[in-house]
Amino acid sequence: MGDVLAGIHATWEFDTDSVLIRFERGIRTPRLFQSLRERRVPHAALSSVTLTPGKRGTVVLRAVPRPGADPLLEVAAGQLKDGYDPYRLVLPAERETLAEYYADELRALLGPDAAEPAERFLVAAPEAPLQFKAYDGRAGFDGERVSFRWFWTGASTAKWKAGDQTFPVTELSGVEWRSPEAINGYLRLLPRRTEGAAPMPGPVSCLDVNAVADEGSGGGGEPAAGLGTGPGRDVAGPAVAGPVRSARADQDPAAVVFGLGYGPVHESLPFAAAVLESVRRKQPAHAAATAAAMTGPGRRDPADIAERIHHLGELHRAGLVTDDEFSAKKAQLLAEL
């Protein structure tokens, strides 16, 4: 394609195998976009493309990434506001015809795998070294390890007793990020469980590759009854029995908490995405083998198959997948049962 489409705050350059998104650095540009600078999104990372009316005489072209394709959106877990979505290109309404042309061009490049979650990250994470200032400490990441250095003015007694912390990414299983724009924002590192060790209580993130759900968080970031609402008050309760671990981020040496002006989205979110990408990339080979063994050779979870077929049907009804592609992919998924 090789064409360029300029919108508000960003420019999309269409290449033969990807879309290069370059963000402006103007005063009105969201600081997250300025921090990201640019992102190359392979066509293989996209699930669909939409064009919808925007606010005040604009239209919005959005490339919808496949689940699991982008570490930034994976760690954001749906907490980003529309204005911070790096996959939205806002255009004047008079450019709707041109935007529809490019939307159709992109849709034509999406294959049947667009209906499935990505098995690995396809969009590059922000590069280390990265650091940011939280409410109770400074977080740093050099590409191999994460460090927390506590501030005496903000850190809890529990963190002071534990001392400054360093976490090799090879000893982590995931990252949990709660937006500083919500109540109780924090960044928590999730340790890898070793064979024979009792499971740890506390919030279990959807980004924890050894866990299955985030229980007790309320799903919408609202504080649970009976818990405080000051900086670092974690609203998640214990998920499983085991050795005592504080569910409050301000008491957990594996977490830093955000406060007003501390740990802003444009600093803490790219940081969390970079750590998550490194954790996934350095996972021991036996982790994948263990996961495969749980479902048995050549067999898949029926619920997962049903969900993928449902998603495939939605793409087919939207005209993003042809009849032949829909039939072939559906038969392939059913054969995995």
Image (cartoon, grey):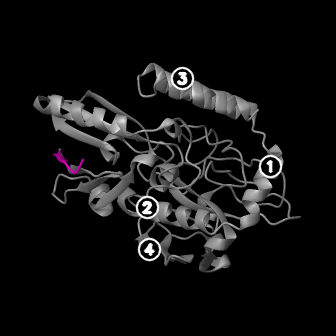
Q: Are marks 1 and 4 in contact (CB under 8 Å)?
A: no
Look at the picture and state if 213 lies above or below 25.
above
How far from the left and from the top, in percent, is residue 4? 18, 49
Label 2 sits on what residue type? Ala
Q: Could you tell me which secondary element the residue under label 4 belongs to?
A: loop
Which dot marks residue 313?
Answer: 3
Query: Label 3: few (<14), some or many (≥20) within 10 Å?
Result: some
Q: Could you tell me which secondary element the residue under label 2 belongs to?
A: loop
Q: Could you tell me which secondary element the residue under label 1 belongs to?
A: loop
Look at the picture and state if 30 lies above or below 61.
below
- Give whichever of 285, 70 is nearer the camera: 285
Label 1 sits on what residue type? Val
Residue at the disc numbered 1: 240
The residue range painted magenta reads 1-6
- Is residue 181 among the parts visible in the rendering? yes
Label 4 sits on what residue type? Ala
> Between marks 1 and 4, how big is the CA–CA gap?
34 Å
- Is residue 184 among the parts visible in the rendering? no
Q: Could you tell me which secondary element the residue under label 3 belongs to?
A: helix
Residue at the disc numbered 4: 128
Q: Is residue 250 left or right of residue 133?
A: right
How far from the left and from the top, in percent, is residue 193? 77, 63
Label 3 sits on what residue type? Gly
Query: Label 4: few (<14), some or many (≥20) within 10 Å?
Result: some
